[in-house]
Amino acid sequence: MTDRQWLCAYVITRNGPCDYGLDPAPWLVGHGDLGIVVSEIEPEVFEQIDPTDPADGGLVRLARRHDEVVRAVFRQAPVLPLRFGTVLAGTDAAVRLLRRSYDQALPCLAQIEGHREWGVRARLAGASQARDDLTGLSGTEYLTLRRERLTSARRSRQSAAEAVGLLHTALRRHATRTAERARAHGVLADTAYLVCQDQESLFHREIDRLTGALDGSGVRLETTGPWPPYTFADIELGRRADV
Amino acid sequence: MADRADSLADLLERVLDKGVVIVGDIGINVVDVELLTLRIRLFIASAQTAREMGMDWWSNDPYFAPNAAKRELENTQLRDRIAELETALAQQAGKELPR
């Protein structure tokens, strides 16, 4: 064991007062106009995470704490959320990071100011179909039926994909940035939209307007958010060359 | 309205998958986020498949779906309200019968 202080780092934000109303309270290490919000941590706590069990209690607790701090800061100032599990070797390392990434982080922070992230996921509704009664069908009849079923499924997918394309075109108009997220099975699109707060009502009105039309095309929409701009904090900081 | 779907799975996926990455000699990586993200995705995919097969116990579990508890409460309130209205109707009918 060493007596070195380890800091769990949550977000890069503007330098300023930092009362977030959390317990335990994180604090802000500042440098110029930038700050990094941290709290002391024993790196061993991350060893409690069981990587074979995603719903493991240790992971859930740490991820919730991370999100709680990010959201608390985000309520007061623009944030660049750091990747979960970022640990720095004390206050000196935090200042060094801010110094090295200053010119890169400051404009990124300005770009996302006043924005929130929304997730829109479109999936095929009613994927499971009732099974056909195949009793008494000849081989040819079965193959004909099968071909009809496959053609109809392909048409449904095409029409759903077109409807999702229209949705994206409509929503993109109200977003400053968009990003496709990894899609799970049966998901047609999983898109993150970075929306300026003065565009949010238009953005949601568009979703409401298109939900009915999408329903007719066999597409079910799910929205998540508002999120701090997790998906749009897609930069690397800290390289020595940045100095 | 589109369904609201914030869940633990969404939170984990966002928190683990994205965010500013510290490179070089300043930060240390204490978590294999790539491995965790992959596992979360597999978990979500298998959860979705199970849901399609009708095995969706977690969608009513407050731990996995925070809105479930609220829905349960709303359902209870609605059931109570229906019972109240039915009683009122029955009383009304009772009053009108003698006429």
Image: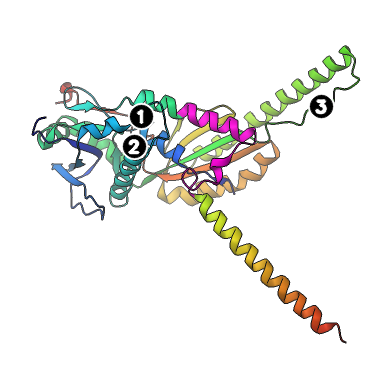
Q: CA distance from mark 1 to mark 3?
A: 44 Å
Quarter placement of the C terminus of chain A:
top left
Q: Give the Cα distance between marks 1 and 2.
A: 7 Å
**Please, which colouring scheme is shown?**
rainbow
Image mark for residue A132: 3
Instruction: Inspect the image, locate mark 3, and give the three-letter code of the amino acid beneath it.
Output: Asp
Q: Residues within 10 Å of mark 2 (few under 14, many from 20)?
A: some
Task: Identify the element where label 1 is drawn.
Answer: loop
Tell me, yes or no, whether the two marked residues, 1 and 2, touch with CB atoms within 8 Å.
Answer: yes
Res B77 seen here: yes
- What residue is shown with label 2? A58
Q: Give whichever of discs 1 and 3 has the lower sequence position.
A: 1
Q: Is residue A27 magenta?
A: no
Q: Amino acid at mark 1?
A: Asp
Where does label 1 land, which residue? Answer: A50
Q: Say if A150 sits above or below A15 in the image.
A: above
The residue under the point 90% across, 14% down is A138
Range shown magenta: B41-66
